Image: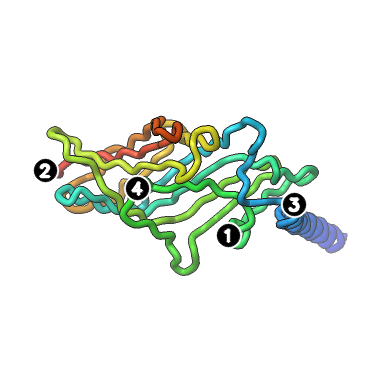
């Protein structure tokens, strides 16, 4: 009798596993269907024609850095995450998120975010391209990459702490199309405190939001300011 009960329990667990696996497979197949070129144009932003701006929430976590106070340059390796909503990706009747890498990323619209003061940007590709995307059934999208960014710092301030800011904005869209925000407020920019480099110690990361006015319109910009103290 005990053997029968145990076997039944195993069968129930296996059935639940199969059901869960099948629902995830179904979610991916549905995602591929609704993002086919006949139904979804990834060159068109969400809400276009609806007088609604795409709000992109950004967070980042720095895992390695080097700060050169003399050359006014900083290098960072970080997890760079962007979140937005694309109602065209809503999956009515589904409960599982669609999760994958570059092949799924290539099927959807992405914000044209760039680093305005960068010298070089590279997506980490060891051992494979470090790219991740998750699409919830309600159309919420999380896009994450591990990237290396080298960027210029502004002139040195006369007092400590020294500071170097990374600036981000849309390359081609004004605020009428894309508005950037910090996804977790004051906690949006994190960094590893387990190491130090050179003569300077990273002591704080502050996020800021700006609206830039140009002759072509107003543009949304966010900045991450990294503050350093000279070691004693």
Q: Nearer the viewer, mark 1 or mark 3?
A: 3
Mark 1–mark 4 Cα distance, whole angstroms, equals 25 Å
Graded by Cα atoms within 10 Å as few (under 14), some (14 to 19) or many (20 or more), the crowding at tag 1 reads: some
Disc marking residue 232: 2
Colour theme: rainbow
**SS at mark 1?**
loop
| Mark 1, residue position | 101
**Residue 157: which quarter of the image?**
top left
**Foreground: disc 1 or disc 4:** 1
Q: CA distance from mark 2 to mark 3?
A: 61 Å
Mark 3 or 4 closer to N-term? 3
Select label 1 or label 2 by which is in front. 1
Residue linked to disc 4: 192
Decide: is 209 above or below 67.
above
Toward the bottom, the furthest residue is 127
Asked whether residue 209 is in view, the answer is: no
Residue 17 is left or right of residue 209, and the answer is right
């Amino acid at each position: 009798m005990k053997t029968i009960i145990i076997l039944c329990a195993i069968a129930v667990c296996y059935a639940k596993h199969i059901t869960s696996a099948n629902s995830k497979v179904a979610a991916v197949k549905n995602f591929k269907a609704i993002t086919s070129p006949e139904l979804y144009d990834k060159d068109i932003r969400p809400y276009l024609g609806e007088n609604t701006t795409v709000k992109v929430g950004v967070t980042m976590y720095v895992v390695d850095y080097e700060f050169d106070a003399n050359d006014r340059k900083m290098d960072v390796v970080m997890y760079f995450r962007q979140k937005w909503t694309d109602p065209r990706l809503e999956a009515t009747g589904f409960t599982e998120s669609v999760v994958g890498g570059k092949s799924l990323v290539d099927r959807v619209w992405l914000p044209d975010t760039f680093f305005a003061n960068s010298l070089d940007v590279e997506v980490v590709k060891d051992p494979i391209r470090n790219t991740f995307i998750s699409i919830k059934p309600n159309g919420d999208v999380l896009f994450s990459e591990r990237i290396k960014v080298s960027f210029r710092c502004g002139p040195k301030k006369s007092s400590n702490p020294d500071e170097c800011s990374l600036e981000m904005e849309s390359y081609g869209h004004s605020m009428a199309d894309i508005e950037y925000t910090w996804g977790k407020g004051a906690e949006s920019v994190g960094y590893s405190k387990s190491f130090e480099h050179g003569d300077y110690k990273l002591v704080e990361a502050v996020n800021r939001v700006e609206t830039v006015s140009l002759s072509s319109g107003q543009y949304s910009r966010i900045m991450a300011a990294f503050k350093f103290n000279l070691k004693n």
